Image (spheres, rainbow, N blue to C red):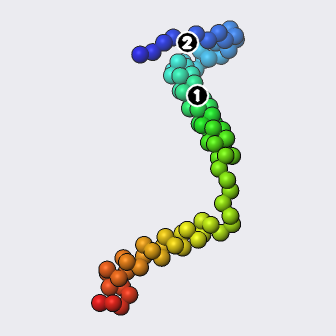
Amino acid sequence: MSTIVCVRIPKKLKERMQKFHNINWSELIRRFIENTVTQLEAEELLRKIEEDLKDIPELPAGTISRWIRIDRETDLLPALKYEGSLGDS
């Protein structure tokens, strides 16, 4: 379903637009509006995410590295033993 949106432009601009008769002005304006709304929604979402992140306490330095190291060590060793890569075959 669609709706009609009217836009008033200066007469001189309309005359200039008519020189470019191969341009579908309605489609161009429709795409511009869609892109603008999408951009504004993304910015709004980003502001909300940033606001929500302010409430999350900061992790101590090195926490993520430690988690990654633990994850790699616990996930990798069983897989290597199963494949016989650790010389346990």
Q: How many marks?
A: 2
Res 6 quadrant in image: top right
Question: Which residue is pictured at 32% across the width and 85% down the height?
Answer: 84
Visible residue check, residue 15 = no
Against 54, is 85 above or below?
A: below
Do the residues bearing badges 1 and 2 touch, measured as CB atoms within 8 Å?
A: no
**At which x and y percent is residue 43?**
63, 36
Against 52, is 6 above or below?
A: above
Check the picture and name the quadrant holding the N terminus: top left
Question: Which residue is pictured at 49% across the width and 70% down the height?
Answer: 71
Q: Secondary structure at mark 1?
A: helix
Three-letter code for the amino acid on which mark 1 is drawn: Val
As rendered, which of 46 and 78 lies closer to the eye?
Answer: 78
Q: Which residue is mark 1?
A: 37
Q: How far apart in space, not on screen, are marks 1 and 2 (Cα)?
A: 15 Å
Residue 67 as seen in the image, left or right of residue 88: right
Q: Residues within 10 Å of mark 2 (few under 14, many from 20)?
A: few
Q: Which residue is mark 2?
A: 5
Among the two numbered marks 1 and 2 on one chain, the one whose residue lies closer to the N terminus: 2
**At which x and y percent is residue 32?**
58, 27
**At which x and y percent is residue 2?**
45, 15
As rendered, which of 3 and 24 lies closer to the eye?
Answer: 3
Q: Residues within 10 Å of mark 1 (few under 14, many from 20)?
A: few
Check the picture and name the quadrant holding the C terminus: bottom left
Q: Secondary structure at mark 2?
A: loop
Numbered disc in front, either 1 or 2? 1
**At which x and y percent is residue 25?**
55, 19
Question: Which residue is pictured at 45% across the width and 74% down the height?
Answer: 74
Residue 20 as seen in the image, left or right of residue 80: right
